[in-house]
Image (tube, rainbow, N blue to C red):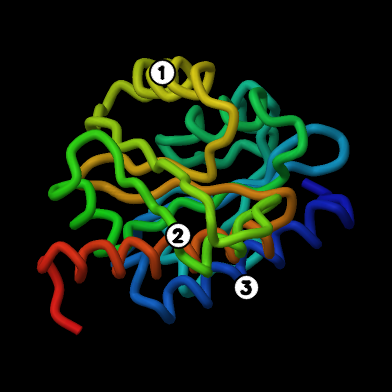
Amino acid sequence: MHYSQDFITAATALCDAGRFIDSKGWVPATSGNFSARLPDGTIAITTSGKHKGCLQIDDIILIDADANSLDGKKPSAETGLHTSLYKRFPDVHAILHPHSINAILASKIFGDEIVLENYELLKAMHGITTHETRITVPIFTNDQDIPRLASQVERYLETVSDCYGYIIAGHGLYTWGETTSEALRHLEALDYLFDCELRLHGVRKP
């Protein structure tokens, strides 16, 4: 299949993000999945079973807005979680899903949400200009039924005005942005803040 320059640009950005995320230890083994929405509405997404620190262009596949493969390759089992977010947020063009230890520990400690308040680093999040703010990251029970899980996330998002990510318990974090670099900034900031909260609650030592 001949890929467009938009696809190649997006796929390259996802490969670069994968190497950075892997350098942090956030995508062990073949965990995680990443995607980027192209200007024509199609989506570049990581294929199933690839190590995210070793991604190549051929490891990124093309799907439509309903998660159907357009090049015959197999997308991640969690593709529906990506497509549901793109349908809800028209300005979002990148989604990153690592399995960082901080997100997983947070899901074991904080119940159904983790609240982040009065941190300077909250200004790393899109649209936030002061540390005097509060964001909530919901935590959803892990579910192998992806359409059911996506519906649960969608119902939550209907009830809030702002959301920068969510955690699947015992699994990992989903976060997003208008670009891959913005999504990566959100990811790095959230993981740092999760670590702060875990240390504050005595779960992790400095």
Residue kind at label 1, given as amino acid type: Pro
- The residue carrying pointer 1 sits among few (fewer than 14), some (14 to 19) or many (20 or more) residues within 10 Å by Cα, namely some
Report helix, strand or loop for mark 2. loop
* Residue 16 - label: 3
Residue 22 on image: x %, y %: 42, 74
- The residue at which mark 1 appears reads as 147
What mark, if any, has residue 84 been given in the picture?
none
CA separation in Å, label 2 and label 1: 35 Å
- For badge 2, the amino acid type reads Asn
Q: CA distance from mark 2 to mark 3?
A: 31 Å
Residue 20, image x, y percentages:
52, 77
Give the residue pinned by disc 2: 118
Pinpoint residue 26: horizontal percent, then vertical percent.
36, 68
Name the residue rendered at 77%, 46% in the picture: 1
Give the spatial CA distance, label 3 vs label 1: 29 Å
Pointer 3 or 1: first along the chain: 3
